[in-house]
Amino acid sequence: MKEIAFREALREAMQEEMRRDDKVFLMGEEVAEYQGAYKVSQGMLEEFGEKRVIDTPIAELGFTGIAVGAAQNGLRPIVEYMTWNFANLALDQILNTASKMLAMSGGQVGCPIVFRGPNGSAGQLGAQHSTAYESMYANIPGLKVISVSNPYDAKGLLKSAIRDNDPVIFMESEVMYGDKGLIPEEEYLIPIGKAKVAREGTDVTIVSFNKMMKVALGAADELAKENISAEVIDLRTIRPLDWHTIMESVKKTNRLVIVEEQWPFASISSEIAYRIQKEGFDYLDAPVRRITSLDAPMHYAPNLVAAYLPDIPRTVNLVKEVMYLKK
């Protein structure tokens, strides 16, 4: 095993797949000469050259369209957005072309492409740079959606995404690029659509993904101090969602709390809560509860940033509510 940073895990995944398959290439804003806006692609221009590591204009709709066309003609592009907030401009190509082409062509034309970049809030960046988009993209048939929380999962799932024959949305986080973790020295892949039990427990299940896993695991640590055993599940893949792992955990703990950085309406937690109460109602000893971002744009002031996002104290209190430990 070796310890590397999140950004290095992503870089290794891309490098390994580009060495393996000359049809794979990277394109996006500042990925080449500047070595990546977050230094994810550092050194890749030197190794692979300007035909496979391509700087684009600040024109998300335009270069996404080029990448989608390349994917339909036999190449396997990786598209990096400086932030998923900017990818709103490319939604027409992602929604109306990439996700639908296989169906519209009767299975004759696929679109093997990875769209990746940081998602959600990253501190005081204001309302237009702080939205989390997993639930929006997960609502689109034809897309696979991955949202990772650590270097090990980032590398293994990005490699699987690059090899996948469907368009994949790959969500990262600015505030995690420097996080370090252990990964194997040898090559490995992680299957798309499989959640991970990040912490075993018996009293309550906490489900989360991406950087909210830090909140979920932090809450589990605090609860353990009060002899409350929380099982924590990292979804990793949002679509297709691993219902089996969630359900098996709920069968054991009989309680479910979901932590996510989404707006509450039509969110991932909404879908999970519906499915678990529909198929697992008899296993529940308390209503499914969730903690989300507030139902408002995220503001700039530090106190409003803190109020907007899920945190450890609120998660701990919610767990105590489902365990009927709060009056």
Image (cartoon, helix red, strand yellow):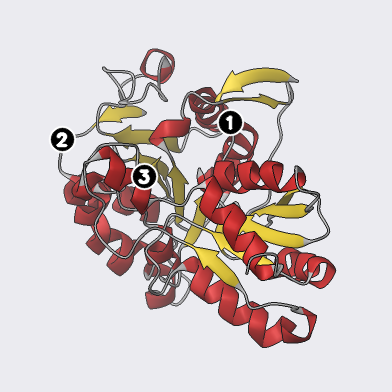
User: Can you identify the residue that label 2 sits on?
Assistant: 57
Q: Position of residue 212 (x, y in %)?
A: 52, 47
Residue 73 visible in rendering: no
Residue 95 visible in rendering: yes
Q: Amino acid at mark 2?
A: Pro
**Disc 2 to disc 3, how far (Cα)?**
34 Å
Residue ID at (74%, 62%): 204
Front one among 108 and 221: 221
Q: Residues within 10 Å of mark 1 (few under 14, many from 20)?
A: few
Residue 306 numbered mark, or none: 3
**Disc 1 to disc 3, how far (Cα)?**
44 Å
Residue ID at (62%, 69%): 327
Q: Position of residue 162 (x, y in %)?
A: 52, 44
Q: Circle 2 — which element?
A: loop
Indicate whether 64 appears above or below 277: above
User: Can you identify the residue that label 1 sits on?
Assistant: 20
Q: Position of residue 120 (x, y in %)?
A: 36, 47
Q: Amino acid at mark 1?
A: Arg
Indicate whether 137 appears above or below 35: below
Front one among 306 and 146: 306
The N terminus, quarter of image: top right
